[in-house]
Image (cartoon, grey):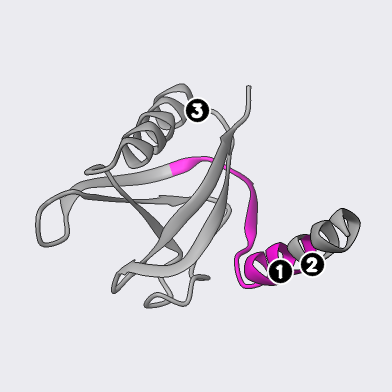
């Protein structure tokens, strides 16, 4: 019974991530803080994802720094940008701004 439950969970998880896409290694090119109605949204772009999200076709991503997770992502984005490190982003498949997709996860490479 547990095996069936685990299989169902895996299928549902893969289906939910099917619309989200990892972007291969690129560097942070632009960071724009203070966006959104409350100024809590930070948008950014990378060299690996130009003109590709469904949010206005800009290829930009955004994080909500009004949440602990968003602040951690923002810190990682800034560190990657300042250090010239490669970054991969998993889009959240939600337009957090009209021209920027939410970030589900990101990885900064050494």
- The answer for how far apart the CA atoms under marks 1 and 2 are is 6 Å
Asked if marks 1 and 2 touch (Cβ < 8 Å), the reply is yes
Q: Residue at x 58, y 37 (%)?
A: 107
Q: Does 21 sit above or below residue 76?
A: below
Horizontally, residue 14 falls left or right of residue 61, namely right
User: Residue 109 or 105: which is nearer the viewer?
Assistant: 105
Between the C-alphas of marks 3 and 2, the distance is 41 Å
Where disc 2 sits, the SS reads: helix
Look at mark 1 in the image and give the residue it sits on: 12
Q: Label for residue 84? A: 3
First to last magenta residue range: 10-28
Image quadrant where residue 71 sits = top left
x 60%, y 65%: residue: 20
Q: Which residue is mark 2?
A: 8
Q: How many marks?
A: 3
Mark nearer the N terminus (1 vs 3): 1
Residue 16 highlighted magenta (yes or no) = yes
> Which residue is located at x 88 percent, y 60 percent?
1
| Mark 3 nearby-residue class (10 Å; few <14, some 14–19, many ≥20) | some
Would you place residue 2 above or below residue 84 in this image?
below
Which percent across, then down, holds residue 98?
A: 29, 74
Expressed as whole percent of the image width and height from the top left, the position of residue 31 reads 31, 44
Image side of residue 15 versus residue 62, left or right: right
């Amino acid at each position: 019974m547990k095996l069936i439950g685990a299989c169902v969970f895996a299928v549902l998880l893969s289906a939910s991530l099917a619309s989200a896409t990892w972007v291969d290694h690129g560097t942070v090119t632009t960071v724009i803080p203070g966006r959104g109605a409350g100024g809590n949204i930070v948008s950014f772009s990378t060299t690996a994802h130009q003109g590709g999200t469904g949010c206005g076709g800009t290829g930009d991503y955004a994080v909500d720094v009004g949440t602990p997770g968003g602040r951690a992502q923002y810190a990682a984005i800034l560190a990657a940008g300042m250090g010239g490190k490669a970054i991969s982003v998993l889009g959240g498949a939600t337009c957090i701004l009209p021209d920027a997709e939410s970030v589900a996860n990101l990885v900064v490479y050494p």
